[in-house]
Image (tube, rainbow, N blue to C red):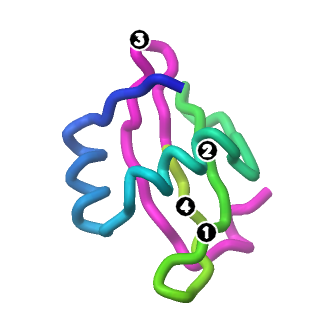
Amino acid sequence: MNYILTEHASKKIKKRKISLNLIEEVIQNPQQILYQDDLLIYQSIVVFNNKEYLLKIYVNQNVGPNKIVTVYMTSKIKKYMV
């Protein structure tokens, strides 16, 4: 998928030290794709610093190219996996 990062997403990625390779991996092979408020949420369980997290990537596909709006990881996997 072709995409661009919003300024907000870029800041969150740097702050949370998430690699772009990991983001691309989840976008290309997500364990789940959800739809919320006109955004697609690509999410997968990933290992980061020897611990499992759920990586969630919010994408606006109503614009071209697709925009990654925000990215975050949570340890509350059971809460957010459907």
State the image quarter where residue 34 is shown. top right
Q: Are marks 4 and 1 in contact (CB under 8 Å)?
A: yes
Density class for disc 4 (Cα within 10 Å; few <14, some 14-19, many ≥20) is many
Residue identified by numbered label 2:
42
Q: Which mark is residue 46?
A: 1
Residue type indicated by callout 2: Tyr
Q: Quick check: 73 above or below 49?
A: above
In the rendered structure, which amino acid carries the disc numbered 4? Leu
Q: Could you tell me residue 48's position as x and y percent?
A: 50, 77
Q: Which numbered disc, 4 or 1, marks the residue that appears first in the sequence?
A: 1
What is the CA distance from the residue labelled 4 to the residue labelled 3?
23 Å
- Pick whichever of labels 3 and 2 is earlier in the sequence: 2
Report how far apart the C-alphas of labels 4 and 2 lie in the structure.
8 Å
| Disc number placed over residue 35 in the picture, else none | none
Which amino acid is tagged 3?
A: Gly
Q: Position of residue 9 (x, y in %)?
A: 30, 46
* Stretch of the chain drawn in magenta: 58-82
Label 3, label 2: how far apart the Cα atoms are:
18 Å
Q: Earlier in the sequence, mark 3 or mark 1?
A: 1
